[in-house]
């Protein structure tokens, strides 16, 4: 009776605390004047950040190539001045007044290639839109640069981003081919060659030269620099940033990543490919022959989601190149497209390993089980229904484990009075109490650890699914019930203020999941508290479990408010099914009277001790004997 009263008082207390918090939030919300001032300050901060970004881009990306152009190629004075600045590459100034960009496109990609610098200045994915229905641009507004720095034989240091390339667009067996040539003469040049196949996210790309032996100084460092600032594509920039990461493959088959949230820098050898992953989209540079070394850098640009709304992370790689017989000779590939395991797997270069499926067994479970299973279910079911069906299948497969756990708890509950009796009888002899308790478990055929083992068995599945849903590209912009995008949070109410860690909106799926977890824990912790005896000198587990009943749902409610709706839907359905299975096991499968009778029968049978149990008993008896000898000496 007292326990029920305590539970009722606890619930009333939590309700009152929650009510007080709501009252405080309501009374402390800013006035319209304060909101206007905050909005003005926020706008000023955004403008300041924009100017700072523009200044940074100006410092990093904007070149002085105007100094390398001439208004009249026939003007010998201008040409002489240009030759004095860039030597033999002054010839390239003849193309300075040509069109600024060249277009490459197929069914899935729209690309712009700058004549100045010869690099890709815009990438639009035709089949995808952002959270605000605008097109997905991986590169736009100078957020990316591709540059080769090299020395010349007349002791100059040049950057390709500053120089003008001459474009030539042609066809090759249905593929679009763009040749960008940085010329010393009509027959001597550095060439970027892009080849785009129909309906393909991968480009063939090469950096080669002809006749530059003696022009380029091979003894001076030649460095390829590739930089990109990840553009925001998702509704929650903080959630997107959590899954935005520089990933790379090196030393044949090793996959590694730079830091997830903070800034990070690394130098690796024998690099096969580099992926600038932006959660659901990736920009990847691949090489036929491994880069001997690559300096990698990632800088977090999203520190405050209220202010940092444009970019997630800034990536930069610096790769030393070597000449081949005095000439450039690099065969590469570029991928601009979705971070979709089914698409990436088609290229057979382990690009799907850039997706964070989880390490070790967790990643294996996702790749071997959940990705194929969900792909099969979603091929003929709506995506929300596919999640529910997959959740049902998972819980049914794990139901024998749940049965074992519940059976173990039932046995421990039946033995609790006898264990309490042993504790009272040997309260002054901890060693003897432990021996008698273990003997009782052994005779009854019960194991206090068997209730924990099912949880350990379920843990890999639990974590694998936790990694699966946020990375499942198939869920992106797929609606279900009130959620318009299962890969992002659902919204049932907008808040007029921002709550730290929670956000400025209310998501319903996390609320439903939190309610389901509350009732699930109410059932399981109640059974565990009834089965676990209180041991002297140990923490009061009953009190800790009571707090966990309220703490765990609260954690789900707060931290999953910005997570993918598909993940919260899974937890909601999973806990509902688990509650149902437990009720069936309790009311229709397990019979405590039969379990009690079986335990009594087990006690009558002689039990053969295992080697481990026998060894433990011998150690305990030896320790007890030593204790008695010490007491005699005293």
Image (cartoon, grey):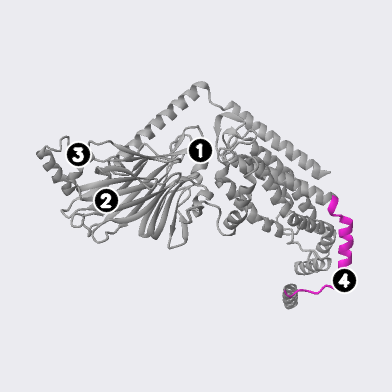
Q: Earlier in the sequence, mark 4 or mark 1?
A: 1
For the record, the magenta segment spans 588-611
Q: Earlier in the sequence, mark 1 or mark 2?
A: 2
Contact (CB < 8 A) between labels 1 and 2?
Answer: no
Residue 111's label in the rendered image is: none
Q: Which sits in the foreground, 503 or 309? A: 309
Local secondary structure at mark 2: strand
Disc 4 to disc 1, how far (Cα)? 65 Å
Disc 2 to disc 3, how far (Cα)? 19 Å
Residue 605's label in the rendered image is: 4
| Rendering coords of residue 446 (x, y %) | 80, 63
Q: Earlier in the sequence, mark 4 or mark 3?
A: 3
Local secondary structure at mark 4: loop
Quarter of the image with the N terminus in it: top right
Per the image, is 487 magenta? no
Which residue in the structure is indicated by mark 2? 149
Q: In the displayed structure, would residue 294 be above or below residue 64?
A: below
| Rendering coords of residue 332 (x, y %) | 37, 53
């Amino acid at each position: 009776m007292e326990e029920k009263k305590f539970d009722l008082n606890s619930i009333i207390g939590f309700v009152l605390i929650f009510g007080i918090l709501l009252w405080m939030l309501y009374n402390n919300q800013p006035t319209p004047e304060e909101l206007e001032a905050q909005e003005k300050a926020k706008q000023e901060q955004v403008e300041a950040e924009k100017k700072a970004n523009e200044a940074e881009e100006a410092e990093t990306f904007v070149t002085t190539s105007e100094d390398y152009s001439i208004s009249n190629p026939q003007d010998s004075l201008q040409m002489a001045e240009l030759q004095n600045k860039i030597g033999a590459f002054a010839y390239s100034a003849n193309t300075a007044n040509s069109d600024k960009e060249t277009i490459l496109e197929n069914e899935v990609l729209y690309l712009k290639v700058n004549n100045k610098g010869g690099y890709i200045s815009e990438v639009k994915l035709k089949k995808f839109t952002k959270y605000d229905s605008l097109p997905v641009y991986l590169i736009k507004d100078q957020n990316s640069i591709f540059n080769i720095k090299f020395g010349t034989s007349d002791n100059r240091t040049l950057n390709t981003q500053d120089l003008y390339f001459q474009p030539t667009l042609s066809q090759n067996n249905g593929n679009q081919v763009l040749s960008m040539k940085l010329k010393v003469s009509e027959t001597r040049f550095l060439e970027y060659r892009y080849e785009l196949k129909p309906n393909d996210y991968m480009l063939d790309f090469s950096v080669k030269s002809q006749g530059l032996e003696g022009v380029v100084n091979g003894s001076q460092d030649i460095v390829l620099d590739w930089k990109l600032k990840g553009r925001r594509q998702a509704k929650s920039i903080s959630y997107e940033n959590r899954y935005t990461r520089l990933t790379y493959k090196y030393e044949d088959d090793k996959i590694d990543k730079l830091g997830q949230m903070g800034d990070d820098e690394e130098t690796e050898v024998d690099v096969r490919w580099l992926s600038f992953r932006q959660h659901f989209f990736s920009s990847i540079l691949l090489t036929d022959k491994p880069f001997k070394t690559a300096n990698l850098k990632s800088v977090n640009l999203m520190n405050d989601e209220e202010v940092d709304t444009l970019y997630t992370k800034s990536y930069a790689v610096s790769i030393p190149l070597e000449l081949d017989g005095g000439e450039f000779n690099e065969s590469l590939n570029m991928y601009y497209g979705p971070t979709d395991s089914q698409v990436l797997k088609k290229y057979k270069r382990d690009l799907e390993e850039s997706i964070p499926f989880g390490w070790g067994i967790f990643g294996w479970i996702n790749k071997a089980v959940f990705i194929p299973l969900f792909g099969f279910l979603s091929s003929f079911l709506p995506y929300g229904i596919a999640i529910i069906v997959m959740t049902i299948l998972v819980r049914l497969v794990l139901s024998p484990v749940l049965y074992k756990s519940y059976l173990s708890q039932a046995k421990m509950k039946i033995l609790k009075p006898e264990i309490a009796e042993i504790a009272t009888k040997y309260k002054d002899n901890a060693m003897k109490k432990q021996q008698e308790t273990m003997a009782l478990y052994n005779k009854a055929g019960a194991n206090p650890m068997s209730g924990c083992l099912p949880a350990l068995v379920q843990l890999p599945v639990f974590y694998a699914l936790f990694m699966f849903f946020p990375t499942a590209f198939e869920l992106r912009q797929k609606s279900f019930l009130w959620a318009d995008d299962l890969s992002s949070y659902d919204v049932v109410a907008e808040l007029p203020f921002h709550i730290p860690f929670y956000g400025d909106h209310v998501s319903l799926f996390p609320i439903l999941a939190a309610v389901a977890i509350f009732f699930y824990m109410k059932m399981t912790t109640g059974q565990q508290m009834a089965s676990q005896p209180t041991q002297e000198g140990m923490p009061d587990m009953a009190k800790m479990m009571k707090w966990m009943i309220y703490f765990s749902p609260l954690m789900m409610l707060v931290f999953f408010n910005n997570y993918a709706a598909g993940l919260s839907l899974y937890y909601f359905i999973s806990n509902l099914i688990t509650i149902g299975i437990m009720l069936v096991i309790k009311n229709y499968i397990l019979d405590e009277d039969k379990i009690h009778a079986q335990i009594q029968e087990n006690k009558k049978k002689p039990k053969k001790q295992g080697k481990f149990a026998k060894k433990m008993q011998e150690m305990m008896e030896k320790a007890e004997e030593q204790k008695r000898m010490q007491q005699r000496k005293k």
